[in-house]
Amino acid sequence: MIVLSNPQAVAAISWPAIRCFVSERMTLMAEDGHYDPDEQGFFLLIEPGDRAETVQADTGFVWCGNLQQHFFE
């Protein structure tokens, strides 16, 4: 999991298409050319091998609990 809270953090993304996508979104979200994660939020890049439980423990955010419930009802 990579936490992307500023445009400089985008350099940590190894996949060019994802790096470009996140960079473009941060640029579009930036007000007056300044990206503020407290105002615009931050991105989480979930990587292969990351487990839902680990992401939840690290972030405090349940990101797929309802999704799993929806698909397995």
Image (cartoon, rainbow, N blue to C red):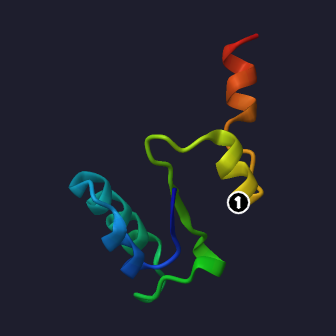
Q: Residue at x 45, y 47 (%)?
A: 47
Please give left or right for residue 21 compared with residue 62 in the image. Answer: left
The amino acid at mark 1 is Thr
Where in the figure is residue 20, as x and y percent of width and height?
A: 27, 61
Please give left or right for residue 43 compared with residue 14 in the image. Answer: right
The residue most toward the left is 16
Q: Secondary structure at mark 1?
A: helix
Q: Is 53 drawn above or below residue 11 in the view shown?
A: above
Where in the figure is residue 43, as x and y percent of width and height?
A: 52, 62
Disc 1 residue crowd, few under 14, some 14–19, many 20+, Cα 10 Å: few
Q: Nearer the viewer, residue 2 or 66?
A: 2
Q: Quadrant of residue 57?
A: bottom right
Q: Quadrant of the C terminus?
A: top right
Q: Quadrant of residue 28?
A: bottom left
Q: Residue at x 65, y 51 (%)?
A: 55
Where in the figure is residue 37, as x and y percent of width and height?
A: 58, 78
Q: Is 56 drawn above or below residue 66 in the view shown?
A: below
Please give left or right for residue 22 compared with residue 61 in the image. Answer: left
Count of residue discs: 1
Q: Is 48 drawn above or below residue 16 in the view shown?
A: above
Q: Is 24 drawn above or below residue 62 in the view shown?
A: below
Where in the figure is residue 46, as x and y percent of width and height?
A: 50, 49
Q: Residue at x 71, y 12 (%)?
A: 72
Q: Residue at x 37, y 81 (%)?
A: 8
Q: Quadrant of residue 38?
A: bottom right
Disc 1: which residue: 59
